[in-house]
Structures are given as structure tokens and as C-alpha cells.
């Protein structure tokens, strides 16, 4: 059976250019039939830029667009000819087997649920993220569709995640865990504890509670949580990744690594307030421009003042008060507690 994908070409911050480019890439690389749904003139103008003649691409006209800030319920009721609604109707009518949209998340979820319905036994659809880990990939859901969940919703998410990991990722017996604040079965709120008790009675390969670190260490193949926790965690991970790549991008610049080491205060490495964020990046005209608003830290000595007196006993005491520092050198350990 040939699979056809309907793409909401008007959804997202960079529509229709990016959705059209993605559809052309899918048709060209994977030979997947694509239906581009949206305003036909705008879509055709983008297609002409990619020389898409001969590719299995068809344009389906839809006159209305759902904005990123619109209410999902209002958009569904008032915009009968929106691109996401027409795309969902193509799946309902069997003309497409899947729909892809980068538009208003709430509107997409509400529209597809109302037009296409849900699987039997599933009350709420969930947003799923497939993330890399140290052993392969993990299925993480829900990451934003359902802010308030009941225990039975988490159980349904676990079943859907189990099926996705088994059928799509090829994991024979996926390990399923509920994200909580501790591994013990007594940890978490009432929702996670009740979901824990229910999942223990299911035939799933339930491994119990997992913590945030288990998303990427490969301890679980399916991580289940409500949409609030999942969305906040996912965006925190995205922000951390952007910060790390930003720092790595600056290292090859002249003196970049030297600046980071010089400004690293000789304090406890787990103190977030004193992390070395004073970095010069591209686009900063003033040398030494700061990325944050923290007050400048006074420069710390990376070694004690050298003792020129040839007193061996004093030199031994000095050596005994040297400690490894966070920046790879030595720092002064004052037993009196003074910096």
C-alpha cells in the first residue's frame, strides 16, 4: 500500500517556504507522494523555486490559515476551510494516510481529533518526541498536548508509546517508565503514584519510576509524563543544547578558550551563580561584552602568592593547602574560610 502524506503548507512561523521545501525533499529523497495543503498560489510560487516538476506532489487548495496565537476551539469552529482542517479531512477520507503540520499545536490536536477521531480506548491524543540516548532512541510522551492528566491518561500514553517503540523503532520489548521525582514507588504526586500501581498490573514491560536523567541515559525506551512536565523538560533540554553548542562555537576563535579559563572563578564547580559566562561572541563590537546581566566577578588567583622565603616548613604548609580548581589548575584553600 502506497502511503500519501498531507502537509499543512500554511502552518508554522516560516510557512509556506519551509513546509514546501520539506515536502519537496520527502518526495525527492524517499519518493513519498505528498499533498501540499494551503493557498494554491503561494504554494505554487514556492514549488517553482525548487524545480519540482515530475515529483509526486499535488497541491490542494485551502483558503484560510490558522494563526499561531489563535484559540484552537475558535479556529475549529470558524475556519471551515483552514489548511489544517482540509489536511485532516484528506486523512479521514482515505486520500492520505498521515498529516504533518508545524502550525498551532493546540489547533492541530483539536482539529485532527474532531475530524479523524481517536483510537478505541484512547481518550486523549499525546505529543510524542523521539530523542537520542546513550543506547539508541527513546519515546517521550506527552510533551505538550495535555496539561492536566488523570492516571488513566498516563496508562494510555504508556500503551501508545509501547506500540510506537515496538512497531516503528523496532524495540522487541520496550521498557516503560513513568517520569517522577524519584525511583521509589512512593515518590511523585497522586497521579503518578496511581499510574504506577495500574501499570504494574499490565502486561507491559514496566520498570517503575524514572527520573529526568533517564531520558538520555537509555535506561527506558518509553518515558511517560503529563504534557506540562514533558513540555517544560523538553524546552529546558533544547535551551541547554543551544547554550552548549554556542560555547563550543566560540572556542575556535582567537583566545576563546583562554578567555573562558581566565574568567573561571576558583570556586566550587557546582555553584551556578559563578559559572564563567563572560565570553566574546560574533556580533559583539565591544570586547568583553557579557551575555548576561550578572555583576562582573573579581579575578581570582589560580595559585597562591609565591613564598620567596627559603623556609621548607612554610613551603610544606603551602603545598598542603593547594586544591584542584574547576578550571584545571590549582586554587588556594584557606582554612579560615576567607576567599
Image (spheres, rainbow, N blue to C red):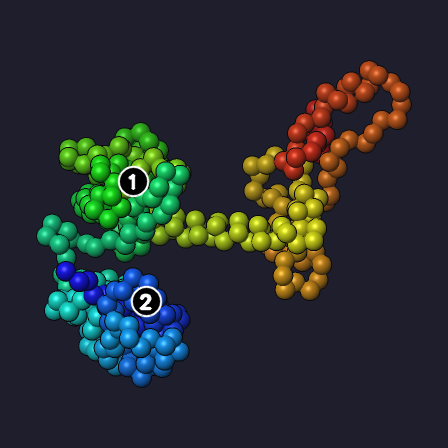
**Vertical placement of 254 versus 21: above or below?**
above
Q: How crowded is mark 2: few (under 14 residues within 10 Å), some or many (20 or more)?
A: some
Q: What element carries label 1?
A: loop
The answer to whether residue 114 is left or right of residue 232 is: left
Name the N-terminal-most of marks 2 and 1: 2
Q: Which residue lies furthest to the bottom in this view?
A: 41
- Residue at 37 percent of width and 70 percent of height: 21
Residue pushed farthest left?
Answer: 120
Q: Identify whether 188 is placed above or below 1.
A: above
- Please state the horizontal and vertical placement of residue 256, each as a whole percent of the image: 67, 51
Name the image quarter holding the C terminus.
Answer: top right
In the image, residue 98 lies at what x, y percent?
21, 62
Name the residue that disc number 2 marks: 28
| Closer to the eye: label 2 or 1 | 2
Residue pointed to by mark 1: 221
Q: Badge 1: few (under 14), some or many (20 or more) residues near its Cα, within 10 Å?
A: many
Q: In this picture, is 178 found above or below 293? A: above
Q: Can residue 317 be seen in this view?
A: yes
For the image shown, how many numbered marks are present on the structure?
Answer: 2
CA–CA distance in space, label 2 to label 1: 32 Å
Q: In which quarter of the image is residue 44?
A: bottom left
Label 2 element class: helix
The residue under the point 29% across, 46% down is 139
Residue at figure coordinates x 43%, y 49% from the top left: 237
Q: In this view, does 38 lie above or below 318?
A: below
Residue at the right extreme, as displayed: 309
The quadrant where residue 136 appears: top left
Viewer-proximal residue among 151 and 303: 303
**Residue placed farthest to the front in the image?**
54
Q: x and y percent of residue 175 in the render?
A: 26, 36
Amino acid at each position: 500500500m502506497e502511503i500519501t502524506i498531507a502537509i499543512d503548507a500554511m502552518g508554522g512561523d516560516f510557512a509556506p517556504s519551509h513546509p514546501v521545501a520539506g515536502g519537496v525533499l520527502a518526495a525527492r529523497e524517499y519518493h513519498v507522494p505528498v499533498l501540499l495543503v494551503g493557498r494554491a498560489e503561494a504554494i505554487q510560487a514556492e514549488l517553482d523555486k525548487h524545480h519540482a516538476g515530475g515529483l509526486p506532489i499535488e497541491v490542494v487548495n485551502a483558503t484560510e490559515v490558522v494563526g499561531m496565537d489563535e484559540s484552537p476551539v475558535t479556529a475549529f469552529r470558524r475556519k471551515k476551510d483552514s489548511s489544517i482542517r482540509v489536511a485532516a479531512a484528506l486523512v479521514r477520507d482515505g486520500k492520505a494516510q498521515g498529516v504533518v503540520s508545524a502550525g498551532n499545536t493546540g489547533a492541530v490536536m483539536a482539529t485532527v481529533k474532531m475530524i479523524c477521531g481517536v483510537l478505541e480506548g484512547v481518550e486523549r491524543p499525546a505529543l510524542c518526541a523521539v530523542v537520542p540516548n546513550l543506547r539508541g532512541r527513546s519515546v517521550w510522551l506527552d510533551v505538550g498536548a495535555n496539561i492536566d492528566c488523570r492516571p488513566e491518561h498516563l496508562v494510555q500514553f504508556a500503551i501508545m508509546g509501547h506500540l510506537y517503540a515496538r512497531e516503528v523503532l523496532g524495540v522487541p520489548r520496550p521498557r516503560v517508565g513513568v517520569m517522577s521525582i524519584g525511583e521509589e514507588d512512593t515518590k511523585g504526586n497522586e497521579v503518578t503514584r496511581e499510574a504506577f500501581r495500574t501499570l504494574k498490573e499490565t502486561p507491559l514491560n514496566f520498570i517503575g519510576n524514572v527520573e529526568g536523567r533517564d531520558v538520555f541515559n537509555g535506561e527506558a525506551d518509553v518515558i511517560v509524563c503529563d504534557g506540562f512536565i514533558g513540555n517544560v523538560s523538553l524546552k529546558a533540554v533544547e535551551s541547554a543544547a543551544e547554550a552548549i553548542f554556542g560555547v563550543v562555537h566560540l572556542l575556535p576563535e582567537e583566545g576563546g578558550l583562554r578567555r573562558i579559563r581566565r574568567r573561571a572563578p576558583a570556586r566550587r564547580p557546582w555553584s551556578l551563580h559563578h559559572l564563567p559566562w563572560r565570553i566574546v561572541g560574533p556580533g559583539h563590537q565591544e570586547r568583553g561584552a557579557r551575555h548576561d546581566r550578572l555583576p562582573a566577578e573579581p579575578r581570582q588567583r589560580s595559585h597562591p602568592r609565591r613564598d620567596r622565603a627559603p623556609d621548607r616548613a612554610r613551603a610544606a604548609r603551602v603545598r598542603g593547602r593547594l586544591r584542584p580548581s574547576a578550571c584545571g589548575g590549582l586554587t588556594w584553600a584557606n582554612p579560615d574560610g576567607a576567599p
